[in-house]
Amino acid sequence: MTFVVTESCIKCKHTDCVEVCPADAFREGPNFLVIDPDACIDCALCVPECPVEAIFDESDLPGDLRHYVALNAELALAWQPIMDKKEALPDADSWSGIKDKFGLLERE
């Protein structure tokens, strides 16, 4: 099993999770983070650090978010590692409670 970043992260991209990851498993895209499933050591340290509750244990993912398992794996191959905390996106607070943001995901 691995941990998975889901929809709540889109257009927010808080990086508190990155700072506590001992495996440097996070990868950064333009408006979203993912966890590299091959690097994740299943420590769960990132989960309580996410202010928008975007990170789930793969086995606990709600059914409507299951596609994020494959998405994290796919984008982890294309995006670069992020190991240091950065500022969230400028309008992160206004996006934090919005649902159905998948169509807003920027891949490049």
Image (cartoon, grey):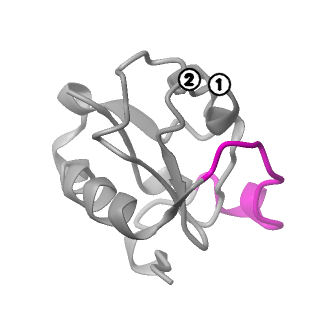
Give the magenta range. 82-97
Q: Residue at x 37, y 37 (%)?
A: 39
Q: Residue at x 77, y 43 (%)?
A: 85
Q: Quadrant of residue 51?
A: top right
Q: Which residue is mark 1?
A: 20
Q: Is residue 97 visible?
A: yes
Q: Residue at x 28, y 61 (%)?
A: 71
Instruction: Say what amino acid the circle numbered 1 marks.
Output: Val
Instruction: Say what amino acid the circle numbered 2 marks.
Output: Pro
Q: Mark 1 Cα within 10 Å, few/some/many (few <14, many 20+)?
A: some
Q: Which mark is residue 22?
A: 2
Q: Disc 2 or disc 1, which is closer to the eye?
A: 2
Confirm or deny contact between disc 2 and disc 1 (CB under 8 A): yes
Horizontal and vertical percent for residue 40? 37, 32
Q: Nearer the viewer, residue 97 or 80?
A: 80
Q: Nearer the viewer, residue 63 or 2?
A: 2
Most distant residue in the bottom direction: 108
Q: Quadrant of residue 16?
A: top right
| 24 is within the stretch colored magenta | no
